[in-house]
Image (spheres, rainbow, N blue to C red):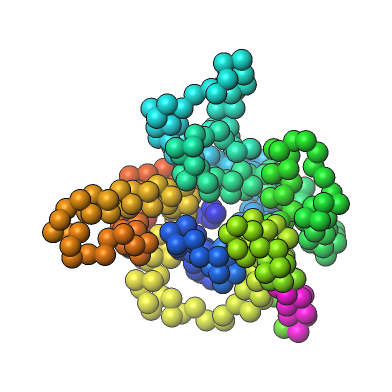
Amino acid sequence: MTGPAPGAGRDRYLDLLRALALVRIVTYHAFGWPWLTLLFPSLGVMFALAGSLMAASLERRAAVSVVGARMRRVLVPFGVFAVFVVPAMFLHGWGPPDPSQASGWWARLLLWVVPLDDPPFSKWAWQVNEPLWYVRAYLWFVLLAPLALAAFRRLPVPLIAGSLLAVTLLQLGVLDTGDSPALGRIVTDLTVFGACWLLGFAHHHGQIARLSPRAACALAVPALAVGGWYALTHQTQQGYDLGPIPLAQAYWSFGFVLLLLRFRPRDLGWLRRAWPVDKVVHVFNARAVTIYLWHELALIAAVLVIDWMWSVPSLANTLPLRTNWWKYVLTWPLLVVALLVFGWVEDLAARRKPQLWPRSRSQG
């Protein structure tokens, strides 16, 4: 989700993939189309990109410094998000459900500072908190990255295969995380997206680029077949949506990401020439955390705007207001507002000079 400071030396292809992943996430949460998770498995892509950047950073700096910096770049914007969300929940009547368990309930509020597990939230705020599992998973990947990278350098293939095997055994009930829901959530995240994170390591070390096209397809196509088959044959209430089906998510994301990283375009000069697209990609990368954290609130605000418009007769009679498309269209300008109000916090977290709007080097 996070990346290096904008400037020279960036991999524009990875920047483009991250921007596409964020657009897909917002689109999915606006419409809920399950086929979007197959068309572009954004979460697997984002974990792979984060793994590649983490491997690069660990080669340049001490592990403690890298882990601290990565956590800071997520936790500072997350803390600002929590400052708005938590008081809003209290204002809507949130509190300890059982006075006898109040001390433990208040202690869990610390997860709104460092969310190593899901922070507590009220039913009123379920939609705002729904995407926060990614922050939890990302932090655990970052904390384990130094050990994982050391193991990957020695046993890359067994480690990737072990991750896919582990999620398979979990899905089939062979492995059990016990009675701890928190442990179950953490282990599931690490196994479902572990192979993608490790593909990021492999990308940084050039191992994917050295794969022949035939070898890459021989690995990716069976994984896609397994993931797609399992999603279609083990559908949930959301249908074949990959989100609630860990095994399908893991295999489909692994195969998809492997193909994306192996068959990357040789020339991205068109991105520079298409300057509006290039600038959007730059903004999405410079403000990735803000977009991810605040996009659900923007979707909620868009619904409120539509409800207000519906109450105005002149608008209600001329516009098809109650559609997801209007919600989707309105969400983007509302996200721009969020970027202007909160985006500069990402600059502080990265120890850059704060900017109201991120500017590329070419913009001065």
Q: In x, y percent, where is residue 105?
A: 58, 23
Q: In x, y percent, where is residue 283?
A: 40, 59
Residue lying at the far top in this picture: please name it. Answer: 100
Residue lying at the far bottom in this picture: please name it. Answer: 214
Q: Which residues are magenta?
A: 214-225
Relative horizontal placement of residue 157, taking residue 300 as reference (left or right): right
Q: Residue at x 26, y 65 (%)?
A: 320
Please say if 335 is above or below 176: below
Residue 89: in magenta span: no
Please say if 126 is above or below 270: above
Q: In x, y percent, where is residue 214?
A: 76, 84
Magenta stretch, main secondary structure class: helix
Residue 352 appears in the rendering:
no
Q: Nearer the viewer, residue 140 or 235?
A: 235
Residue 286 lies in what quarter of the image? bottom left
Q: Residue at x 30, y 48 (%)?
A: 304
Q: In x, y percent, where is residue 227?
A: 71, 68
Please say if 31 is above or below 211: above
Q: Residue at x 38, y 27 (%)?
A: 91
Please say if 282 is above or below 59: below
Residue 330 appears in the rendering:
yes
